[in-house]
Image (tube, coloured by chain):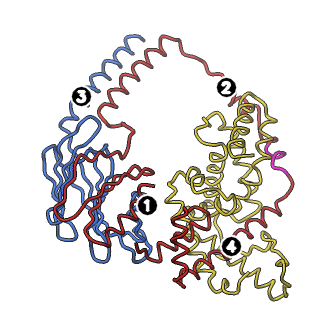
Chain colours: A red, B yellow, C blue
């Protein structure tokens, strides 16, 4: 399967963070062996990452030893402490029950009209047919998106691999 | 100490604070202050502002502890507040287009294993300033993602939890941020460090 | 006090039932976004911000919005969208079932026909046909 350099540059960035799997790593190494542009990109990114870490770490190492606590403790008031241990006045039990019951009934009725079902983006594909190409249906777990994709040529078969990596992961 | 041990220890301290033990909150502040200041600095690029933001973050966290229901790890919630407050601070504060960072960056005078000439030191300083300028102009979401990754070495999943986005978005933001930095620093990178 | 609360409860019940009743005659709105996904360039059209996290799964390096159209129809009504590649996107609103909106979607030239049900304000992505130097992606957001 063939990917373009943009794909491998993204893998380079993810490899910096150890966020690619063994197969992707192998695939990237093979590509870097033959592609000078991506090899240079990889080298540049490594240098830049060292620079960036150096810049940020030098700030941390020069960070003042004076703790923030002295300033924070002085600003905490008894009101802040009471926020945590607050004591609210309670309504008479029967009023609370009636209000709670009416909210429950109203809420259930509203939910049943689908306005606030709260389950966004769930799709169930019942059937698919295509006269000219095969069709793949994917469920992207992270965004709960359903993708219905027509495959008609070699280039789209490659896309199928990409989508499977992206969508099903 | 594993990440789970850290989470469990944080949860114990939080429960003690909610029960009224302010000393336990001191423990939390000491544990996280450097990280919070570091993240704030990464976004606002000013030591004093970063310290101010960190103070506000810890005050806000203390006042909101009753709302923290343990649905995420404590540091996820803490870092999310830090990033949001830093970005808000930066938006409010107007900045001039050219900013020198001499007071904020203490760069290394020597690269281990190499002797450094005065001209090389100046060059290094110039590169650092160039890098800071480049980071400064990144879009907020890319900058926040880069800061969390490069300062705290958080995983993509942890960053996604903090910024409330997908790991794909984290990967994409880091890719585009690094691409932009590389384009701006390209003339310097060939000299090597 | 009790009379007041009882009155509020009664009115709430009346309102809720009227809302329920109206659900069966609800009009359904379909927003179709026609997008070109390509591996040339690395830009994402700013108008696609809301769905970029879904599009990114298709692993193209650039996404540009070619066209967008919104149509509203009652159950059993046919909605026709002109596609950028000359094809026609035909959507029939089959109805609302439990918490789902049922649709029949077909593309004449592409020869695709599919039947699915989706939650209110849900988005589904359909595509794959070659378009210019990339592929044509259609994002369908359905609501009522």
Q: Quick check: C142 left or right of C53?
A: left
The residue carrying pointer 2 sits among few (fewer than 14), some (14 to 19) or many (20 or more) residues within 10 Å by Cα, namely: few
When the figure is inspected, residue A110 is found, relative to residue B162, above or below; the finding is: above
Circle nearer the N terminus (2, 1): 2
Foreground label between 2 and 1 = 1
**Inter-mark Cα distance, 3 to 2:** 41 Å
Secondary structure under badge 3? helix
Quarter of the image where one finds residue B146: bottom right
Q: Which residues are magenta?
A: A67-72
What residue would you read off at disc 2? A86
Q: Are marks 3 and 2 on the same chain?
A: no
B51 and B165: which one is in front? B165
Q: Secondary structure at mark 4?
A: helix
- The vertical placement of A158 against A110, above or below, is below
Residue shown at the point (83%, 83%) measured from the top left: B114
Which residue is labeled 1 in the image? A165
Residue B91 picture location, percent across and down: 60, 61
**Chain hosting mark 1:** A
- Disc 4: which residue: B132
Q: Position of residue C141 (x, y in %)?
A: 30, 52
- The residue singled out by tag 3 in the image is C18
State whether discs 1 and 4 lie on one chain: no
Disc 4 from disc 3: Cα separation? 61 Å
Image position, residue A31 (x, y; %): 51, 77
| Left-right relation of A80 to B83 | right
Q: Circles 4 and 3: CB distance less than 8 Å? A: no
The chain containing the residue under callout 3 comes to C
Q: Say yes or no: labels 4 and 3 on the same chain.
A: no
Question: Which mark lies nearer to you, 1 or 4?
Answer: 1
Please, what secondary structure does the residue beneath circle 1 have? helix
């Amino acid at each position: 399967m063939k990917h373009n350099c943009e794909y491998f540059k993204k893998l380079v960035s993810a490899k910096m963070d150890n966020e690619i799997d063994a197969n992707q790593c192998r695939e990237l190494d093979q590509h870097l062996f033959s592609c000078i542009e991506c090899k240079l990109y990889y080298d540049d990114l490594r240098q830049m990452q060292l620079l960036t870490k150096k810049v940020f770490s030098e700030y941390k190492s020069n960070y003042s030893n004076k703790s923030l606590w002295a300033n924070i403790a002085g600003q905490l008031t008894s009101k802040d402490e009471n926020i945590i241990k607050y004591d609210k006045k309670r309504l008479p039990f029967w009023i609370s029950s009636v209000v709670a019951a009416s909210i429950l009934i109203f809420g259930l009725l509203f939910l049943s009209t689908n306005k606030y079902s709260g389950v966004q983006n769930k799709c169930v594909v019942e059937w698919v047919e295509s006269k000219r190409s095969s069709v793949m249906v994917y469920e992207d777990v992270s965004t709960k998106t359903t993708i219905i994709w027509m495959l008609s040529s070699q280039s789209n078969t490659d896309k199928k691999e990409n989508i499977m990596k992206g969508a099903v992961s | 100490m594993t990440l789970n041990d850290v989470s469990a220890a944080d949860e114990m301290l939080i429960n003690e604070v909610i029960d009224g033990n302010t000393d336990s909150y001191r423990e939390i502040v000491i544990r996280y202050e450097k990280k919070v200041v570091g993240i704030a600095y990464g976004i606002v690029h000013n030591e004093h502002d970063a310290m101010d933001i960190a103070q506000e973050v810890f005050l806000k966290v203390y006042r909101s502890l009753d709302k923290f229901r343990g649905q995420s790890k404590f540091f996820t919630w803490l870092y999310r507040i830090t990033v949001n407050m830093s970005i808000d601070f930066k938006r409010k504060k107007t900045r001039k287009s050219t900013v020198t960072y001499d007071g904020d960056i203490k760069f290394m005078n020597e690269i281990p294993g190499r002797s450094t000439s005065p001209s090389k030191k100046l060059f290094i300083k110039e590169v650092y300033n160039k890098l800071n300028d480049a980071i400064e102009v990144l879009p907020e979401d890319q900058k926040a993602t880069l800061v969390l990754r490069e300062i705290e070495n958080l995983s993509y999943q942890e960053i996604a939890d903090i910024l409330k986005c997908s790991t794909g978005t984290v990967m994409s933001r880091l890719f585009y941020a690094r691409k932009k930095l590389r384009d701006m620093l390209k003339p310097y990178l060939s000299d090597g460090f | 006090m009790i009379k007041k609360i009882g009155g509020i409860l009664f009115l709430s019940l009346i309102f809720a039932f009227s809302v329920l009743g109206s659900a069966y005659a609800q009009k359904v709105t379909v927003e179709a976004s026609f997008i070109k996904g390509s591996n040339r360039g690395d830009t994402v059209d700013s108008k696609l911000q809301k769905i970029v996290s879904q599009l990114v799964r298709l692993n193209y390096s650039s996404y540009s919005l070619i066209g967008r159209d919104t149509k509203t129809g009652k159950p059993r009504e046919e909605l026709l969208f002109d596609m950028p590649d000359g094809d026609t996107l035909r959507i029939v609103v089959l109805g609302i079932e439990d918490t789902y909106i049922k649709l029949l979607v077909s593309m004449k030239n592409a020869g695709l026909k599919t039947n699915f049900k989706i939650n209110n304000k849900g988005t589904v992505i359909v595509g794959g046909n070659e378009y210019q130097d990339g592929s044509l992606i259609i994002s369908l957001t359905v609501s009522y």
